[in-house]
């Protein structure tokens, strides 16, 4: 090594001059001055030592170090790129609104608690994103009255493009046995007298697939879309009824899988 070759020079430079035993010491003799050549050799020795120390400290131990650093760097860059991509895309939730709802039949028999119903709901579905396409592969609408599910209907699947609004209509017709508590039964009778039923609701059970720019997701089930506290007028014999108030539906983040934590 270069340091070993230069050791005689370093030893010579840093060696202390001591007088010989047979040489008398003169107190008035001045100390010899260090020559310029000695200073130059000392600087050269420091430089060689410094370079050798750096070489020894940063010498690669094995090829595994390079492999580990490469894999770690690639993983870090991949995760960082996905985070940046998601921040740029940042899809907003799809918006559901009930624009109209009406009842032409809503009779609950007192002897067997059977509900006869004819319930129609119009809904708008708005995709506010400019870079996300939503593919609806299953759409099931479920009707509720005072925490009792009484009807369900499957709607036609469709694809929804960027910044697009789709109009849906769900019609529930049939009969179902439901169980109402005493208080709920009293509320039903009051609502029937007024002609407006207040505790109707519609939930949407969806299975979708999303396309973010050029990347398509697998199929997943977003959170239930809940359209609650609908005040629906009962229209009988063609009589006029008060207009329905547009109601916004709620859900958790639309592009999350509700079964992910199951």
Image (spheres, rainbow, N blue to C red):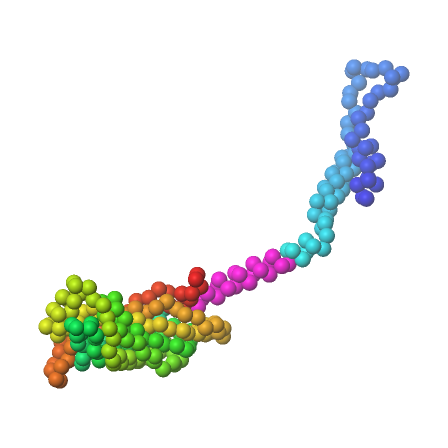
Percent coordinates x, y for residue 245 in the rendering: 19, 73
Outermost residue on the right side: it is 22
Q: In the picture, which quadrant includes the N terminus?
A: top right
Res. 96 in view: no
215 on left or right of 59: left
- Residue 241 percent coordinates (x, y): 13, 78
Residue 210 placement: quadrant: bottom left
Seen at 20% across and 66% down, the residue is: 180
Q: Dominant secondary structure of the magenta stretch?
A: helix
Query: Which residue occupies 48% across, 63% down?
Result: 84
Frontmost residue, 57 versus 96 = 96
Q: Is residue 239 visible?
A: yes
Q: Is residue 183 above or below residue 202?
A: above
Q: Which residues are magenta?
A: 70-92
Quadrant housing residue 124: bottom left
Residue shown at the point (68%, 53%) measured from the top left = 65
Is 39 magenta? The answer is no
Left or right side of 5 for 141: left
Name which quarter of the figure residue 132 lies in.
Answer: bottom left
Q: Nearer the viewer, residue 131 or 199?
A: 199
């Amino acid at each position: 090594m270069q340091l070993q070759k230069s050791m005689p020079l370093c030893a010579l430079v840093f060696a202390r001059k001591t007088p010989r035993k047979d040489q008398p010491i003169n107190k008035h003799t001045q100390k010899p001055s260090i020559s310029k050549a000695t200073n130059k050799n000392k600087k050269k020795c420091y430089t060689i030592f410094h370079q050798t120390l750096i070489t020894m400290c940063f010498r690669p131990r094995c090829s595994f170090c390079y492999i580990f650093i490469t894999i770690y760097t690639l993983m870090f860059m991949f995760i960082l790129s996905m985070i940046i991509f998601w921040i740029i895309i940042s899809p907003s939730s799809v918006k559901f609104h009930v624009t109209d709802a009406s009842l032409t039949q809503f009779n609950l028999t007192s002897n067997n608690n059977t509900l006869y119903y004819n319930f129609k709901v119009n809904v708008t579905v708005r995709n506010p994103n400019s870079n996300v396409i939503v593919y609806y592969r299953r759409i099931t609408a479920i009707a509720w009255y005072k925490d009792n599910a009484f009807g369900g209907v499957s709607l036609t699947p469709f694809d929804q493009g960027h910044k697009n609004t789709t109009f849906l209509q769900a019609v529930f017709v049939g009969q179902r046995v439901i169980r109402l508590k005493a208080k709920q039964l009293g509320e039903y009778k009051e609502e029937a007298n007024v002609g407006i039923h207040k505790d109707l609701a519609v939930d949407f059970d969806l299975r979708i697939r999303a396309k973010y720019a050029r990347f398509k997701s697998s199929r997943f089930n977003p959170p239930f879309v809940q359209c609650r506290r609908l005040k629906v007028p009962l229209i009988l014999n063609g009589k006029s009824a008060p207009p329905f108030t547009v109601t916004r539906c709620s859900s958790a983040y639309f592009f999350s899988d509700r079964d992910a934590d199951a």
